Amino acid sequence: MSKTAVLFIDHVTAIGGAETSLLLMLQHLGRSRWQPHLACVDGRLAQAAQTLDIPTHIIPLPRLRRSRQFSRDWHVGSSAISKLARRIDAKILHANTVRAAIYAAPAAKTARRPFLWHMRDFWLSENRPKRVWIDRWGKRLLCLAAAQVIANSQATAGHLPCAGKVTVLPNAIDVSRFDPKTDGRTLRQQYNIPQDAPVVGMVGRLRPWKGQHRFIQMAAQVNQQLPESWFLIVGGSPFGVTDGYAEEVQALAEKSGLGSRLIFTGQLDDVRPALAAMNVFVHPGDPEPFGLVNIEAMAMEKPVVAFAHGALPEIVVDGETGVLAQPDDIDDLATAVLTLLSNPEKARKMGQNGRNRVKNHFNINHYMQKLDAIYRTLL
């Protein structure tokens, strides 16, 4: 039986959570039936896909926001996708990001192919837009154009105006890549952290909604009660945008009194050694559409402490795999962390429960079976 070509489209050059999920889909898509292709701009994502031997097509996908030649840029990108879809005889167009969907919608119509919109955000822009009506209008148009819509959480699905087309498919990981026995001593040695010291950490891009400022506030409270504690902030600015937030966070760190006990590792290509070095993982951000790193931490058997908003209640079972604090309540966040640090056995059990939950609910093999079923409905 001949393979059916699926054209994935992504607009970014670097690798974030959406691109990590995309690479997993490309890697695990059943090759007996499907032939994945990737259309993207040149950059690290293209290089990673090529390393996986995925046919990768470099196309122009200009930035549309504030573009002075919006119509021209839109036509350039959508035309490139349409021509490519015809050339490789792609039967399905799978848009992995909002900008990719904006380009793929007209391309799919021109090429007469079904278009699958994978929505991984609450908004069409990176943050809540000032003009919410534009966001609603844009979502309606994309929903009309899409044959199917995948939302990465119930929280994300709640922001979409086309419930009849939406399938909730939570993000997944390859659990086998996350070994709870990974040695965290090397990273501790690198940063002069005592091997027996309690370590609390977070992972995320240096952007305001990831909550590094809240993490530092929480860390200061924890350290007052537990002076031997250490803190890791893992992440940088892979997309090259900080808007001064990195400087703001550094200034807050200097005023926190934590000194050398608060460590910024910068961007890490592999976060597993950092997760291995932690006793408790914290997710202190704004409401998230998902938050892939939470299931990565759980797969490493780390208890997760997070605010009870966004998709986090769909991931963390309060009191079983971690603790959900009241939204934006730094005191409650610090109390949860202190509770786990003072009860290592409870934390250990939560970590084990977390890994089991990932195996059962966020496993890439189960994920790909469901994606395969969605594709079959589009043919």
Image (tube, helix red, strand yellow):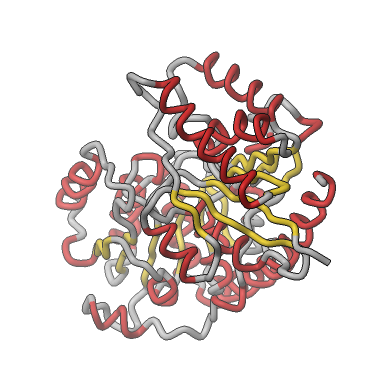
Q: Is residue 194 above or below residue 371?
A: below
Point 27% across, 61% down: residue: 266
Residue 283 spot, x, y in % from top left: 46, 53
Name the residue at 41% across, 53% down.
334
Whether residue 309 is visible, yes or no, is no
Considering only vertical position in the picture, is 282 above or below 63? Answer: below
Q: Position of residue 372 (x, y in %)?
A: 77, 57
Residue 209: quadrant of the picture: top left
What residue lies at 33% left-to-right and 19% top-to-bottom? 68
Image quadrant in which you'd find residue 167: top right
Residue 85 visible in the displayed image: yes
For this view, does 102 lie left or right of residue 374? left
- In depth, the one of 235 and 61 nearer the eye is 61
Percent of width and height locating residue 79: 53, 33
Residue at figure coordinates x 65%, y 44% from the top left = 93
Q: Nearer the viewer, residue 356 or 9?
A: 9
Which residue occupies the foreground of this view, 230 or 243? 243
On-image quarter of the N terminus: bottom right
The spot of residue 119 in percent (x, y) is 61, 40
**Is 43 on the left or on the right of 138, as rendered?**
left
How many marks the image carries: the answer is 0
